[in-house]
Image (tube, grey):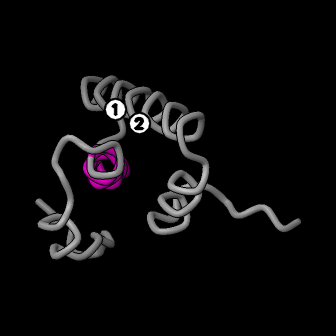
Amino acid sequence: MVKNSFIPIISQEKKKEENPGSVEFQVFNFTNKIRRLTSHLELHRKDYLSQRGLRQILGKRQRLLSYLSKKNGIRYKNLINQLDIRESQIR
């Protein structure tokens, strides 16, 4: 089994500061799970249960991000830039 040491994980001090129920913290955790599952699926392409789990987590993260973008666009943009989720749009 290959350790996921190459996956960039955001600093642990950020985790301790945040409220575990906050939208940012939940998106942070989902992003880490998505990165782990993606690297797992590169090795195990036919693991369909993991593919299903990945799709579910992606959906949850998408719903949280859409909620945050409607509620507070500045926090949304900061989170997107910090986690490097979306490609930045040059305007």
Q: Quadrant of the N terminus?
A: bottom left
Q: Which residues are magenta?
A: 26-43
Q: How many marks?
A: 2
Does the stretch in magenta take in 48? no
Q: Residues within 10 Å of mark 1 (few under 14, many from 20)?
A: some
Quadrant in the picture for residue 60: top left
Where in the figure is residue 86, as x and y percent of width and height? 61, 55
Q: Main secondary structure of the magenta part?
A: helix
Quadrant in the picture for residue 39: bottom left
Residue at 59% over, 34% down? 70
Instruction: Write down the residue under mark 1.
Output: 57
Task: State the residue lying farthest toward the right.
Answer: 91
Q: Which mark is residue 61?
A: 2
Nearer to me, 1 or 89: 89
Position of residue 59 relative to residue 7, above or below, is above
| Three-letter code, disc 2 | Arg
Nearer to me, 39 or 16: 16
